[in-house]
């Protein structure tokens, strides 16, 4: 019987090297995945940080000819954190409610020409779309559901009927049972910038504190 030739030493070394290289590649891949998870987690923590009036580290942005100094922790989107001119700024601010709770309000700043105030929409649009029903539950505000047509399903408008420049917010019912509705309110700031506020419907209970609460934040950055 013929004996099988012994494998060449070079072949054994080649296979060993390939095995080691594959192990290193797997290790590098695992480290890369771990680093990605770490970066993502740090990003989540950063985004979850509650903005405060005392925050620093501002960037300077100019919108509608107005220069604003905005703390980086106030931005909703990281890609907006840069100096320069812009036509839209998305922030997350906090409102202290009448009962002492602190709730987030998402604020979008735009040139005035790109927005129409909720108060002007009340007379020009909303009043013609109200159903005959009246909603209750928010002291000082009248709640009117919109007619279930023209895309207004599940929407309502809440407004102060006694003011010449009323608080007005348009709200959408909660998508899931037990959830909270969402509301939108648009105003023109004295600076000429338009502000669109988006907030949880529970904030309506503190509507009298709303504008003054937002003024504190927007004055801080020069937007008011």
Image (spheres, grey):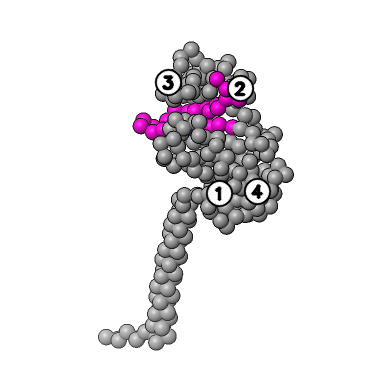
Q: Which callout, 4 or 1, points at the residue further toward the start of the chain? A: 4
Mark 4 or mark 3: which comes first in sequence? 4
Residue plotted at (60% across, 50% down): 70
Residue 52 falls inside the magenta stretch: no
Question: Which range is magenta?
Answer: 162-186
- Residue shown at 57% from the left, 20% from the top: 126
The first of marks 3 and 2 along the sequence is 3
How many marks the image carries: the answer is 4
Residue 96: where, in percent of width, then height?
A: 46, 40
Mark 1 residue element? loop
Q: Is residue 90 above or below residue 7?
A: above
Report the side of 122 relative to 158 (left or right).
right
In the rendered image, the vertical position of residue 24 relative to residue 117, given as above or below = below
- Residue 164 is tagged as 2
Residue 189, position as x, y percentages in the image: 64, 36
Left or right placement of residue 139 versus residue 85 in this view: left
What quarter of the picture does the N terminus occupy?
Answer: bottom left
Residue 149 visible (yes or no): no
Q: Secondary structure at mark 2?
A: loop
Q: Are marks 4 and 2 in contact (CB under 8 Å)?
A: no
Residue pointed to by mark 3:
136
Label placed on residue 75:
1
Is 167 contained in the magenta span?
yes
Q: CA distance from mark 3 to mark 2?
A: 21 Å
């Amino acid at each position: 019987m013929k004996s099988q030739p012994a494998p060449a030493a070079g072949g054994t070394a080649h296979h060993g090297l390939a095995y080691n290289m594959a192990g290193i590649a797997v290790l590098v891949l695992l480290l890369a995945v771990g680093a990605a998870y770490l970066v993502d987690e740090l990003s989540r923590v950063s985004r979850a940080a509650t903005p405060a009036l005392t925050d620093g580290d501002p960037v300077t942005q100019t919108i509608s000819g107005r220069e604003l100094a905005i703390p980086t922790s106030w931005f909703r989107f990281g890609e907006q954190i840069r100096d320069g001119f812009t036509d839209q700024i998305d922030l997350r601010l906090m409102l202290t409610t009448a009962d002492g709770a602190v709730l987030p309000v998402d604020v979008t700043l735009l040139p005035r020409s790109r927005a129409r105030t909720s108060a002007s929409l009340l007379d020009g649009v909303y009043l013609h779309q109200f159903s005959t029903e009246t909603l209750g539950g928010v002291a000082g505000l009248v709640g009117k559901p919109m007619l279930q047509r023209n895309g207004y399903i599940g929407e309502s408008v809440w407004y102060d009927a006694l003011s010449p420049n009323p608080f007005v917010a348009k709200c959408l019912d909660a998508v899931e049972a037990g959830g909270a509705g969402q509301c939108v309110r648009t105003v023109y700031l004295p600076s000429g910038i338009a502000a669109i506020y988006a907030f949880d419907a529970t904030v309506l209970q503190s509507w009298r504190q709303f504008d003054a609460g937002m003024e504190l934040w927007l004055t801080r950055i020069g937007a008011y």
